[in-house]
Image (cartoon, rainbow, N blue to C red):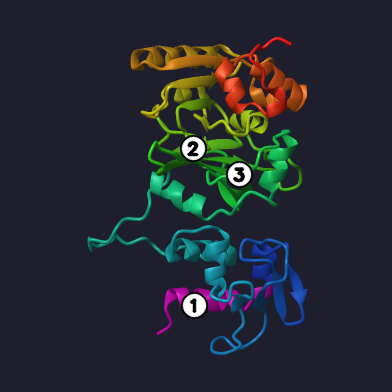
Amino acid sequence: MISAAADLARRLARDAEAVCRHYLSKGHRVGRYWTAGDVMNTPGRSLYVRLTGPDSGPGAAGKWTDAASPSEHGDLLDLIRLNRNLYGLGEAMNEARCFLALPRPPIPSPPNLGHAPAAASGSPEAARRLFHAGRPVPGTPAEAYLRARSITSRLDWPALRFHPAVYYRETQHASLETWPALLAAVTDIDGNITGIQRTWLDPHRATKAPVTDPRRALGHLLGNGVRFGMTTDILVAGEGVETTLAVKSVLPSVPVIAGLSATHLAALDLPPALLRLYVARDNDAAGLKAAQRLRERGRAAGLEIHELVPVHGDFNLDLCRLGPDGMLEHLADQLVPSDRMRFLPPDDRRSDPRR
């Protein structure tokens, strides 16, 4: 008896080229094969999918292999699961049924077999799975997006990933869409991933996707943040990923953390070894309130707190409008003298902030 999964895989294989055109749209047909860069629809030729052949056995239609990683192979159901970042066979089968316009079977009440439950939507585990399904940012549309924001810092941080197809739903009852996305890992003080921020991107331009809410977070955010660099005794904390990467662009050796909102910035868990905290706040009422809250918390903990205030709305806008030299000039004037000597490039170090 053929299993439901095997039956779906055979149905997909009977229309293998249509499957490939849908899920591997950046590939193309070469003879009896469809070629692409990988299962994530990257342009290239290392992945090949057989378009014709018997239903099963050697040379069966729908079978695929990635020559760049021979251990990666399977049928079209496997390809759909990997391409759509689905977490199990059941989700892949539902996606395949949608493609084939087949009804979903009724969902029976599951017996209690003591198995670990699937990751709940919005849970830290779901966030970790999505983040680990991404790839490094360099060379991807996420890099193009950040470079278009004038960010010049390195982008191969462990906290950043890119995924070419992340689900987006406009409202609870709207249909699912997929867009490429920049993923930022939210971690606790011990480095455990507790959540992520997704920034959906326009696939054709270096900007955010044209959707109502192109930036959303999931998982546990309170007290945690997106970290760039190892915190020692000095830390710069800001709201957004782009804001903190802008600071990193002109002060590459200073550790920074993004709280992702003014509210979460004010609630950051502060490392025990921290002596001095700079709050790179946004230039608005919420940013001022977050800085005041951190000042109160710092005073109670015996920390030295300083505010870094941008010229414009935030430090990413400063970087775009002032350029790296102008932003560094403005930032340097707000650092204590010892930190100017420690973190500024040698040509910009000075004990007196006024020239």
Q: Which mark is residue 211?
A: none
The residue at 45%/32% (across/down) is 232
In three-dimensional space, the C-alpha distance between marks 3 and 2, rounded to whole angstroms, equals: 22 Å
Q: Secondary structure at mark 3?
A: strand
Q: Secondary structure at mark 2?
A: loop
Sequence-wise first label, 1 or 2? 1
Residue 277 in view: yes
Q: Is residue 157 above or below residue 317?
A: below
Viewer-closest of 78 and 330: 330
Instruction: Tell me the crowding category of disc 2: few under 14, some 14 to 19, or many 20 or more residues within 10 angstroms, Cα based.
Output: few
Question: Which numbered disc, 3 or 2, marks the residue closer to the eye?
Answer: 2
Viewer-closest of 291 and 352: 352
Q: Is residue 160 magenta?
A: no
Q: Position of residue 114 (x, y in %)?
A: 23, 61
State yes or no: discs 3 and 1 in contact (Cβ < 8 Å): no
Residue beneath disc 3: 182
Q: Which mark is residue 7?
A: 1
Quarter of the view holding residue 284: top right
The overriding secondary structure of the stretch rendered in magenta is helix
Residue stretch rendered in magenta on the structure: 1-17
In three-dimensional space, the C-alpha distance between marks 3 and 1, rounded to whole angstroms, equals: 36 Å
Q: Amino acid at mark 2?
A: Met
Residue 123 in view: no
Q: Amino acid at mark 3?
A: Leu
State yes or no: discs 3 and 2 in contact (Cβ < 8 Å): no
Q: Position of residue 72 (x, y in %)?
A: 55, 72
Q: Is residue 14 magenta?
A: yes
